């Protein structure tokens, strides 16, 4: 897989200096996505998912320090010059953000925002860019696209705005789309539509996608591979079917157990993960999940487990006491 | 997938409608007064009014008449035409000086807000120095040194306005440049220039323009004060401030000579303030959830 990887993130570390000390947002993360494949990145709030996606795009806050390599299509995004990076962005690398309320410019019409992006990257004339914009809006399921071009973002609903944001991201046929919690700000009914739309456009354009979410249910049917992140580290990484069949990391198990299910009896207490993620400004000696883990033993508190291979090289986990019996997973 | 099957043709979409916001009678009255003063000032030379500098020593402080609609001043000059020509000075200085502040201050504010860092701190520091200097003293000193002229007056008032505009632009840019749409634009490969001009400027220009109108009002008053003190435009050119100053001498016999330019200035400044306030309220982010 690593041979034809479109994007490979190698030993990426992101440090954010804060008044309380250095915050390690991303800690030695290794990931790769092949062309046309989908990687799901799952983890709870503050586990470094967004920082990882920003690190790939080189859009980290100014103070953040990045180490490691981000190889995209044969180029190291960390070290290439700004102008080449700028040309890659939008053209080959695109992103859809969490909140469509804020990711569109409030004072420009939908048409202006789409057409200018197209003109900038594809050097189309106005008429061609306009035609393409209408096609794109129609492709993402927006009714009456000609009229929408003249509207402002605040005149559209949240779901419509996210469709517009997706249309802008797709406008230059990127090779890799990073979807950073694309459905978190949307109604549940719209979520499935947006995810289906992303999956459909991905297949049609044969682009790779990184789907970042806190919801294991979202990645279940829609990704080829899943990386579970906790406290800045990848704690389990596996092809999606293998992960759901046989998860090894207790954190993954706990995340899955915390999803409400339809078939549980009413008033059942949801098995939430107790406690909170560790303070990222104070690195822990042991496994970051050990204070909340129900399998933790003394060794977990004193030593950090490295990613080790399970049955297949594609399935990796970082735990001293991986879950052995697949039936134990309450799914 | 079935949820995605939207019937594109059937869906009726209403055309974008202009949101009718009530602006109020006062706003339109202010706009009306501004247009009236602008028209008089622009067409002053073609209006059938006497020359504002021709003195008629036999008709000093004459009351309202068919010949002199608003009477004459202490030197027998037509009061109405002096008011109209005075409007030219007040408006030229009042509009041009904040224009300097708007462009220079706005640009500096946006650049310092967007790039921040050492450059931003430097700009803020320089502006703080400029703000800390007593403005009227600075104007007096500069005018005394370079001489009285409309150009000098406009330039110095314009430079004094830069820090305020810079602060407004910087504050707006600082909050906006952390918004996701700026990051989204960067992610789409937009250059810094493009982000500043296409993404940020349309957002920053609204509060800046509202502030500009308030700046016009302030500048008209400051110009009036300077002219009143005899440091504004050199005589015999009339300006509202110098007319009030000259009218002061005959306040006991003909108080109207001081009051009429004062009323003209009051109404004009009030109009600019009203329009500026209304626009500021309209662009206030708390009002419309942009």
Image (cartoon, coloured by chain):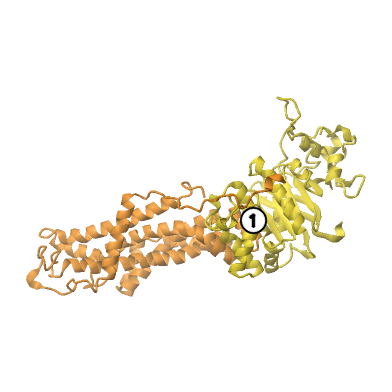
Q: Could you say which quadrant of the image residue A111 lies in? A: bottom right
Q: Could you say which quadrant of the image residue A119 lies in? A: bottom right
Chain ID at mark 1: A
Where does label 1 land, which residue? A138
Badge 1 crowding class, 10 Å Cα cut-off, few under 14, some 14 to 19, many 20 or more, is: some
Asked if residue B190 shows in the view, the reply is no
| Letter of the chain in orange | B
Question: Residue A96 at what x, y percent from top left?
Answer: 67, 53
Q: Nearer the viewer, residue B124 or B283?
A: B283
- Most extreme residue toward the right is A311
Q: Residue at x 12, y 70 (%)?
A: B76
Residue A190 is left or right of residue B282, and the answer is: right
Residue A216 is left or right of residue B61, and the answer is: right
Chain A appears what colour?
Answer: yellow
Query: Which secondary structure lies at badge 1?
Result: helix
Question: Residue B210 at what x, y percent from top left?
Answer: 41, 57
Name above or below for residue B130 compared with residue A262.
below
Question: Residue A210 at what x, y percent from top left?
Answer: 75, 52
Asked if residue B57 shows in the view, the reply is yes
């Amino acid at each position: 897989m690593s041979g034809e990887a479109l994007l490979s993130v190698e030993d990426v570390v992101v440090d954010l200096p804060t008044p309380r000390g250095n915050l390690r947002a991303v800690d030695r993360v290794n990931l790769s996505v092949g062309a046309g494949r989908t990687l799901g990145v799952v983890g709870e709030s503050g586990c470094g998912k967004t920082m990882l996606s920003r690190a790939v795009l080189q859009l980290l806050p100014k103070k953040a320090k990045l180490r490691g390599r981000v190889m995209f299509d044969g180029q190291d995004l960390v070290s290439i010059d700004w102008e080449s990076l700028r040309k890659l962005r939008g053209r080959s690398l695109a992103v859809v953000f969490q909140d469509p309320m804020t990711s569109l410019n409030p004072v420009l019409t939908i048409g202006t925002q789409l057409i200018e992006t197209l003109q900038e990257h594809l050097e189309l004339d106005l008429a061609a860019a306009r035609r393409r914009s209408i096609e794109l809006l129609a492709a993402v399921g927006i009714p009456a696209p000609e009229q929408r071009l003249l509207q402002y973002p605040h005149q559209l609903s949240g779901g419509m705005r996210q469709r517009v944001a997706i249309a802008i991201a797709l406008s230059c046929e990127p090779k890799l789309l990073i979807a950073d919690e694309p459905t978190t700000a949307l109604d549940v009914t719209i979520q499935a539509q947006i995810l289906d739309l992303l999956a459909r456009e991905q297949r049609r354009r044969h682009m790779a996608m990184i789907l970042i979410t806190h919801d294991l249910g979202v990645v279940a049917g829609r990704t080829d591979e899943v990386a579970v992140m906790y406290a800045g580290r990848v704690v389990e990484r596996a092809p999606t079917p293998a992960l759901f069949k046989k998860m090894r990391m207790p954190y993954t198990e706990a995340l899955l157990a915390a999803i409400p299910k339809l078939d549980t009896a009413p008033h059942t207490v949801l098995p939430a993960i107790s406690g909170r993620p560790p303070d990222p400004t104070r690195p822990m000696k042991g496994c970051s999940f050990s204070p909340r883990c129900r399998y933790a033993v003394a060794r977990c508190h004193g030593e950090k487990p490295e990613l080790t291979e399970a049955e297949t090289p594609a399935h990796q986990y970082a735990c001293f006491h991986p879950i052995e019996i697949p039936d134990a997973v309450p799914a | 997938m079935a949820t995605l099957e939207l019937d594109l043709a059937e869906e009726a979409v209403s055309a974008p409608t202009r949101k009718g916001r009530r602006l109020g009678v006062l706003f339109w009255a202010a706009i009306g007064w501004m247009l009236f003063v602008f028209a008089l000032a622009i067409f002053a030379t073609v209006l059938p009014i006497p020359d504002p500098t021709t003195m008629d020593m036999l008709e000093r402080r004459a009351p309202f008449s068919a010949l002199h609609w608003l009477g004459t001043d202490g030197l027998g000059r037509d009061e109405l035409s002096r008011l109209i020509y005075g409007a030219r000075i007040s408006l030229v200085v009042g509009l041009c000086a904040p224009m300097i502040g708007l462009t220079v201050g706005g640009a500096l504010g946006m650049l310092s807000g967007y790039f921040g860092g050492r450059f931003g701190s430097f700009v803020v520091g320089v502006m703080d120095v400029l703000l800390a200097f007593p403005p009227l003293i600075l104007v007096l000193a500069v005018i005394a040194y370079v001489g009285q002229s409309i150009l000098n007056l406009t330039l110095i008032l314009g430079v004094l306005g830069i820090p305020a505009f810079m602060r407004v632009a910087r504050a707006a840019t600082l909050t906006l440049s952390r918004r996701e749409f700026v990051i989204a634009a960067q992610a789409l490969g937009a250059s810094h220039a493009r982000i500043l001009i296409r993404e940020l400027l349309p957002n920053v220009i609204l509060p800046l323009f509202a502030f500009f109108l308030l700046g016009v009002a302030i500048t008209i008053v400051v110009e009036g004060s300077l002219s009143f003190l005899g440091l504004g435009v050199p005589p015999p050119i009339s300006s509202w401030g110098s007319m009030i100053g000259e009218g002061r001498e005959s306040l006991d016999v003909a108080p109207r000579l001081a009051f009429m330019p004062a009323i003209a200035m009051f109404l004009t400044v009030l109009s600019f303030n009203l329009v500026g306030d209304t626009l500021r309220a309209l662009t206030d982010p708390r009002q419309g959830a942009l």
